[in-house]
Amino acid sequence: MPLLVGRVFSGLSAGSFAGTATATLIDLAPARGRQRAAAIAVGVTLGGLGFGNLLSGLLAQIGVVPLRFPYWAHLALLLPAVPAVFFAPETVKVSPHPRFRPQRLAVPKEVRGTFAPAALGGFSAFACPEERRGEVNATFYVVLYMGLCVSIVGVGLLSEVTGLRTAGIVLACVVTGLASAAALSLLLRDRRPVA
């Protein structure tokens, strides 16, 4: 049970950090390079989603303590990022007396129509108003990481009852259904007349 709780918190923290990192990278890019910065950020993040699982599995196979070794490796890989974050220039106005307040997850009304299909597709892009870019990105990544967490934990629990093969088939069917729903939603949205 502690491992499952840790996995959920790991997903939430990674999702929140990835959203902030993406918004910062885009803000630091010159105006004409922002699309490329967004593409790089998305590619690195989604690549990390895939390769992170592969690396964790490999480390768990060779590690002395397979349930902890991948997390230790993750912490070691984060160490070089600490000075980079510390010395990165601020991209927003800072109050002279800032109060620590975690930013809430939110999707503003003007991007909900785009966000929902993108989040469904990410579970089985960015719609990003400039002043709310961090909120939208953080929410998007939390959905992605929670999708990753729920699928891993769900397959693990289901495999205990039905076996790994059946659990994998069920996961494939769920992901196919979600991806199909996202594709259908995008097709229908593109056919709507522009107001």
Image (tube, helix red, strand yellow):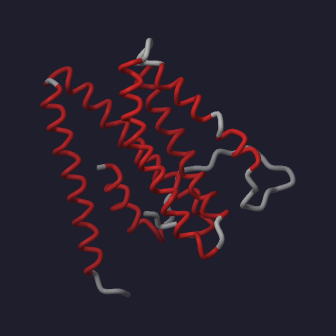
- Residue 93 position by quadrant: bottom right
Query: Residue 9's spot in the image, x, y percent?
Result: 50, 32
**Percent coordinates x, y for residue 125 in the rendering:** 43, 63
Q: Please state if 116 lies on the left or on the right of 161 as rendered.
A: right
Picture coordinates of residue 141 (x, y %)? 47, 50
Q: Is residue 176 rendered to the left or right of residue 67?
A: left
Q: Quadrant of the C terminus?
A: bottom left
> Up-down: is 60 above or below 25?
above
From what the image shows, is residue 97 above or below residue 69? below
The quarter holding residue 135 reads: bottom right
Picture residue at 74% right of the left edge, 44% below the top:
86
In the foreground, 148 or 30: 30
Q: Residue furthest front?
A: 62
Residue 99 in the image: above or below residue 151:
below
Left-right relation of 107 to 162: right
| Image point (28%, 69%), residue name | 186
Q: Quadrant where the N terminus lies?
A: top left
- Identified at 36% across, 28% down, the residue is 57
In front: 61, or 93? 61
